[in-house]
Image: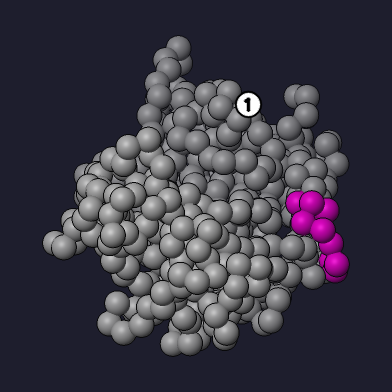
């Protein structure tokens, strides 16, 4: 399809620049410019102007590309003018055009002109030779965590339903900075933390990155009959070295101090072999709340990389027993609201207790000079076995009584563990007197399975259909 750009200021707007699909991808034309290389709003009849024609992708054989121009539709066969020399730089050419009156003897253009970029023999109007170009591969990697419950959050069972959750399952929808209700009204989703990094595969650089938290609403400091809305300012970072990408984001509940950080790190390696993009990597996480990551091509096709669901909302109790991190929480809170003076403290305390591999091979195809996803060649799926509702209920009750068991254990100082209750002894045995690691009584069981030759929809649907927690429909 031809691209037309109107020359501003000409009476009746008769003169246009038409760019045919001679090459793939198409040519972009900018102008008019004067002799000082200033972009003008309008062209004056009888004067010459410069236009810049650029191939949207630089060809692999740029030195063999020939540029030509034809003036006026009826003169294609005879009015080619070839461009060469200093006005051509790789995939860009500068053209001088004289816009003349119809009765002028120095007319270069009456109605329109067309730009050609080609290799080989000069093409005629019916036979265009396409330039051999290298397609681009732009990838956006998304990762985010979310609270799948309508309401969640308590202090070991006290003051339940303190915060509004994100009230959703796994999703590929766009993220929004608003809370769940507003986000869903816009056809989007909210998340506790969200990070997106867009990269250029061939040039091995990060194009842009975004990291933020959706709005948090609930009872500040668990105070009854209160309500507030605040937005966390998370720390996030991305880096790329060759074909290796690393992404990390962490932040805490802005309504509670102290509060444990949500913290996750994603590392990925990209390797394009002919028409297959191989992606391998690892996700490191703290097992609360739910987590999802997916990759997106330049045309908006999205594919899940990994999903994780916590067993129940009281898994937060074990994060609250991370005494080392809880001690640093006020500094993290100040860091988020002032400057990064405590960033080294924050980053030195990941305490990841969930680590899983990511392996996926995606077939790609060239569409208009861009490599885009076609289907799934193979993919490693790591998922947690569902747990019976009665077991989930018992474990939630146990998590709520965890702090009481510890406080009732007798000497909490030097002789901790000597006179422990049953729950306290179990906690001590698990952490081996290292109090910044908690105990999950109900152990998750994970399975790995490799799927082959799937459509993108089949792979995504498998993840979308999984519950984001095992207590979403639990009656207590």
**Horizontal and vertical percent for residue 421?**
63, 45
Residue sitting at 31 percent across and 70 percent down?
94
**Which element is circle 1 on?**
loop
- Foreground residue among 274 and 192: 274
Q: Name the residue under label 1.
A: 150
Residue sitting at 48 percent across and 45 percent down?
193
Q: In this view, does 172 lie above or below 356?
A: above
> Any magenta on residue 458?
yes
Left or right: 458 in relation to 439 = right
Left or right: 467 in relation to 426 = right
Residue sitting at 32 percent across and 68 percent down?
95
Answer with the quarter of the image where residue 63 lies: bottom left
Tell me the quarter of the image containing the C terminus.
Answer: top right
In the image, which residues are magenta? 451-460
Q: Is residue 455 visible?
A: yes
Residue sitting at 85 percent across and 41 percent down?
388
**Horizontal and vertical percent for residue 346?**
35, 57
- Foreground residue among 470 and 24: 24
- Foreground residue among 461 and 456: 456
**Horizontal and vertical percent for residue 160?**
57, 25
């Amino acid at each position: 399809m031809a691209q037309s750009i109107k020359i501003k200021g000409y009476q009746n707007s008769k003169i246009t620049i038409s760019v045919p699909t001679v090459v793939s991808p198409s040519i972009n034309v900018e102008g008019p410019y004067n002799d000082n290389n200033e972009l003008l709003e309008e062209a004056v009849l009888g004067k010459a102007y410069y236009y810049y024609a650029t191939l949207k992708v630089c060809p692999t054989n740029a030195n063999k590309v020939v540029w030509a121009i034809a003036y006026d539709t009826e003169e294609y066969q005879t009015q080619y003018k070839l461009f060469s020399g200093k006005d051509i730089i790789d995939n860009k050419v500068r053209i001088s055009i004289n816009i003349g009156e119809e009765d002028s003897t120095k007319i270069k253009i009456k109605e329109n002109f067309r730009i050609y970029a080609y290799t080989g023999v000069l093409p005629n109007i019916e036979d265009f030779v396409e330039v051999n170009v290298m397609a681009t591969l732009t990838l956006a990697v998304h990762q985010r965590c979310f609270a799948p419950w309508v309401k969640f959050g308590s202090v070991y069972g006290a003051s339940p339903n303190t915060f509004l959750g994100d009230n959703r399952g796994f999703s590929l929808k766009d993220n929004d900075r608003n809370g769940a209700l507003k986000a869903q009204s816009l056809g989007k989703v909210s998340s506790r933390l969200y990070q997106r990094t867009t990269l250029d595969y061939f040039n091995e650089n990060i194009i842009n990155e975004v990291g933020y938290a959706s709005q948090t609403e609930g009872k500040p400091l668990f105070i009854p009959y209160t309500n507030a809305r605040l937005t966390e300012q998370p720390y996030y970072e991305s880096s790329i070295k060759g074909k290796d990408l690393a992404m990390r984001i962490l932040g805490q509940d802005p309504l509670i101090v102290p509060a444990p950080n949500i913290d996750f790190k994603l590392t990925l390696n990209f390797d394009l072999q002919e028409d297959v993009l191989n992606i391998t990597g690892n996700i490191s996480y703290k097992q609360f709340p739910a987590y999802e990551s997916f990759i997106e091509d330049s045309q908006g096709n999205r594919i899940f990389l990994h999903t994780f669901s916590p067993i129940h909302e009281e898994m937060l109790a074990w994060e609250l027993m991370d005494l080392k991190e809880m001690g640093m929480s006020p500094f993290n809170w100040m860091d988020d609201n002032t400057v990064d003076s405590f960033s080294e403290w924050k980053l030195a305390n990941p305490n990841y207790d969930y680590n899983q591999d990511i392996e996926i091979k995606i077939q790609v195809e060239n569409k208009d000079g861009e490599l885009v996803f076609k289907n799934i060649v193979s993919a490693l799926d790591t998922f947690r076995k569902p747990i019976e509702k009665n077991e989930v209920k018992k474990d939630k009750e146990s998590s709520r009584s965890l702090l009481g068991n510890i406080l009732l254990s007798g000497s909490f100082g030097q002789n901790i563990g000597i006179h422990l209750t049953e729950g306290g002894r179990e906690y001590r045995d698990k952490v081996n007197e290292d109090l910044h690691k908690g105990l999950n009584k109900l152990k998750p069981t994970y399975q790995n399975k490799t799927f082959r030759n799937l459509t993108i929809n089949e792979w995504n649907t498998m993840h979308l259909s999984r519950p984001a927690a095992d207590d979403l429909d639990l009656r207590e």
